[in-house]
Image: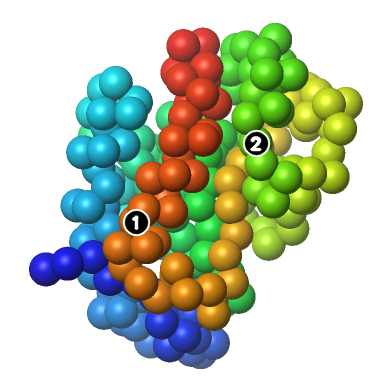
Amino acid sequence: MSVQGFAPQDFAVFTIDGLAPRMEALRERIQPKFRLLGDELRADLSAQAGHELHVHIAQHLRRTTNPPKDTWMAFAPGKRGYKMLPHFQIGLFDDHLFLWFALIYELPEKAAIAGRLLRGVRKLKALVPDDYVISLDHTKKDHYRAGDWKERDWRAALERLRDVRSAEFLVGRHLQPDDPRVADGQSLAELARETFAVLMPFYETAVAAR
């Protein structure tokens, strides 16, 4: 089956009340599309990374009351999980699709990785197009436009990643639900390839520091 994009009703999943009904909708509407997208991208991303990346689809198993307000898939070098590793994400909130290179709080080598990113921050910053975005918390929609950040802002974010246990750092793209590339599966897959190719030096730097 060919890769599929995401329609407005997919984003509307996050308006469904209740944990069980929303999870059922995620399993029926979103996760099959994640599986197809993962099948489409995994080999190419593994080739770019120089080692095998595995696909992980968020299951939200720890939730017992509150329904998830976003969902995602990840590409990571570990078979068993991704949160403790540098990884790439594709996911949805109710009002945008995100494509991230992600370093989140569970990562045990954050200080070493942040230090290595800091040493190359000027070159890495120059690789990021102005319309890309940066997040310091993967659970929130808050983000910063890369074009608005000076080198000192990058350094401050990476120093916080190094020094604060709960700190995170994500860089990538946001797309609106009505962007035609979101609804077209092949266009979305190609955009993901392009985005992750731009961000691959961040991944390579992070992996080299582990």
- Image coordinates of residue 97 in percent, x first then y, are 52, 65
Mark 1, residue position: 189
Q: Alpha-carbon neighbours of circle 1 within 10 Å: few (<14), some, or many (≥20)?
A: many
Name the amino acid type tagged 2.
Val
Mark 2 or mark 1: whose residue is earlier in sequence = 2
- Residue at point 31% right, 79% down? 29
Mark 2, residue position: 128
- For mark 1, give the secondary structure: helix
> Residue 21: which quarter of the image?
bottom left
- For mark 2, give the secondary structure: loop
Q: Is residue 116 above or below residue 145?
A: above
Q: Is residue 139 above or below residue 177?
A: above
> Residue 46: which quarter of the image?
top left
Q: Is residue 25 left or right of residue 115?
A: left
- Residue at point 39% right, 61% down? 188
CA separation in Å, label 2 and label 1: 19 Å
- Residue at point 53% right, 58% down? 98
Name the amino acid type tagged 1.
Ala
Q: 24 or 196: nearer the eye?
A: 196
Using the rendered image of the protein, determine whether residue 115 is visible from the camera's viewpoint: no
Q: 182 or 33: nearer the eye?
A: 182
Q: Is residue 48 above or below residue 204?
A: below
Using the rendered image of the protein, determine whether residue 128 is visible from the camera's viewpoint: yes
Q: 9 or 106: nearer the eye?
A: 9
> Residue 23: which quarter of the image?
bottom left
Q: In the image, which disc is placed on residue 42?
A: none
- Image coordinates of residue 171 in percent, x first then y, are 62, 41
Q: Is residue 160 above or below residue 89?
A: above
